[in-house]
Image (cartoon, helix red, strand yellow):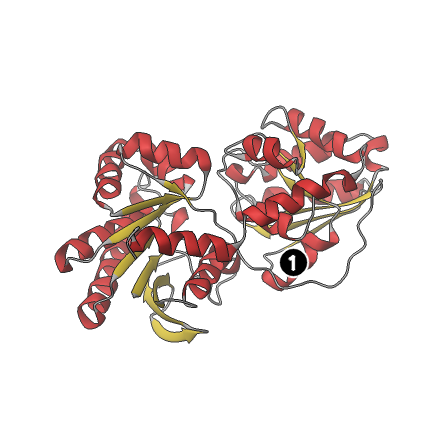
Amino acid sequence: MHVAIVTTSYPDATPGSEAAGSFVADFAQQLARQLQVTVIAAATRASRSRDGNVDVIRFEVPRLPLSLLKPSHPGDWPAIIRTLRNGKHALEKFVEDERPDYLFALWALPSGHWAASVGRRFDIPFGIWALGSDIWSLGQIPVLRGHLRRVLRAADNCFADGLKLAKDVESLSRRRCHFLASTRVLPKPGDASKAGFSPYKLAFLGRWHKNKGVDVLMETLLTLSDQDWSKIAALQICGGGPLHDEVHRLAAELQLQNRPVEVGGYLDKQDAAGLINWADYLLLPSRVESIPVIFSDAVQLRTPIVATPVGDLPALHERFSFGTLAPSPSSEGFLQALREALNGNAMDFGAGLDAAAAEFDIADIAQRFVEEIKGPDS
């Protein structure tokens, strides 16, 4: 069986693409252990290459990440139109030449739009893996909501990378949607000594965007008392994004107060694994979330998490007790959860982290996908 994955997120040499598309590459490699897999992905330059057992065809788009293109901004429309045209053309040409058995769109828009159009023309079944940004952002734009519903309903299989998100997809499309967790394979980092009691090492790794709550984190840090800071051995904030200037400005303010804060850029998988393994707690202050990939990163490395109660995180916390959970997705709520962590024993969460790691195993995730698209009689 030949599966073609069409996606707007696949890692290349672009800074930040490792974070955005790493789990897509790992998922493709896992699938390639039992299927033929080709990836058709957006990139800043067109190319064709081999990535392990996966063929990768890159089509050119004006800029990345595509998530920063806003339909509500008239100035973005030339880039949006060019992206839509190039993506459809690349998938169409590949399907015409190689006739895969199945198209898998990551994510609903625009990839699902391409898969629906090309799949219909060539009579090839297709599936969609929806993200929160599809349903909770694009799905709120009236002109796109109806088209999103039609694309989801046309798919032969629907998946979503969150429990609540799968229900929201079903509500929008009035069709079945399966939960399929997004996770990546981290390289084994070196040994790290984790503390059971404060002072603790803390880490934030992610996109510096309001949805990811990096501003919530910075606000919380500015609120911490001297006594709170005495329980923090070191804090690293890594990533990049629209709030770059604000993060650096507030971090400099904290450093002037002699707080042990360091700021770094995007990290590849090896360095990400090293940072998460180094930390006694991973900080996850998101405002909008389903189940972030960084969650599965942390549980793989058995690093407890301080999180806000958004998306599926409350349900996951109830099942796995992976760390401390804030009462609200605000700086006041996150402050409460952080103080609870600083005053507690980080080793108390081991059993829950073990159970969560088993749930987010990429081999099982890929196998569930294969069984679903092949059907019960395969």
State the residue at coordinates (71%, 26%).
Answer: 336
State the residue at coordinates (66%, 38%).
Answer: 322
Label 1 crowd (10 A; few <14 / some 14-19 / many >=20) = many
State the residue at coordinates (36%, 37%).
Answer: 135
Residue 123 horizontal/vertical position (percent): 15, 57
Q: Residue furthest front?
A: 377
Q: Nearer the viewer, residue 201 or 162?
A: 162
Identify residue for label 1. Answer: 273
56 sits left or right of 82 in the view:
right
Q: Quadrant of the N terminus?
A: bottom left
Q: Where is 132 relative to 33, above or below?
A: above
Residue 246 horizontal/vertical position (percent): 60, 41
120 sits left or right of 353 in the view:
left
Residue 73 horizontal/vertical position (percent): 33, 41
242 sits left or right of 300 in the view:
left
Q: Residue furthest bottom?
A: 49
Tell me the quarter of the picture where residue 371 sits: bottom left
Q: How many marks?
A: 1
Determine if residue 370 is in view.
Answer: yes
Q: Where is 175 relative to 37, above or below?
A: above
Q: Quadrant of the C terminus?
A: bottom left
Residue 177 horizontal/vertical position (percent): 34, 39
Amino acid type, residue under disc 1 in the picture: Ala
Q: Element at badge 1?
A: helix
Determine if residue 250 is in view.
Answer: no
State the residue at coordinates (26%, 39%).
Answer: 148
